[in-house]
Image (spheres, rainbow, N blue to C red):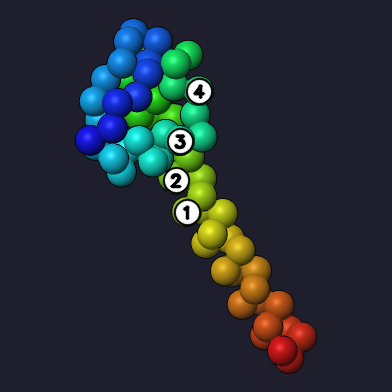
Amino acid sequence: MSEVEFRTGPREIPDYLADMMADLDTYRMTYEEAVKAANDNLVKRRIKSFADDLLVEHLRKHTGR
């Protein structure tokens, strides 16, 4: 468990969630806002990864590499 500072005060949260929130200014957010932001970032990273993989596959097919 990790203690994270939120706008509403410190809160103990699981380590994996603290890791997901590491790049957020949680002290400016409520717990609920931070969870939503962390989940949104996770979805964005997953979509970007999928798009990058798709682009690499496309370039490999059309450049012969």
State whether residue 15 appears in this view. Answer: yes
- Which residue is drawn at the image coordinates 47% and 14% (left, top)? 28
Is disc 1 in contact with disc 2, using a CB cutoff of under 8 Å? yes
User: 62 above or below 35?
Assistant: below
- Would you say 41 lies left or right of 64 here? left
The residues tagged by marks 2 and 3 sit, at their Cα atoms, a distance apart of 16 Å
Q: Secondary structure at mark 1?
A: helix
The residues tagged by marks 1 and 2 sit, at their Cα atoms, a distance apart of 5 Å
Farthest residue to the bottom: give it: 64
Per the image, the residue denoted by label 1 is 46
Per the image, the residue denoted by label 3 is 22
Q: Residue 10 sits in which quadrant?
A: top left
- Tag in front: 2 or 4: 4
Q: Secondary structure at mark 3?
A: loop
Q: Position of residue 49 (x, y in %)?
A: 54, 59
Q: Residue 54 sits in which quadrant?
A: bottom right
Task: Give the amino acid type for the residue marked by disc 4 in the picture.
Answer: Asp
Residue 43, numbered circle: 2
Task: Give the amino acid type for the residue marked by disc 1 in the picture.
Answer: Arg
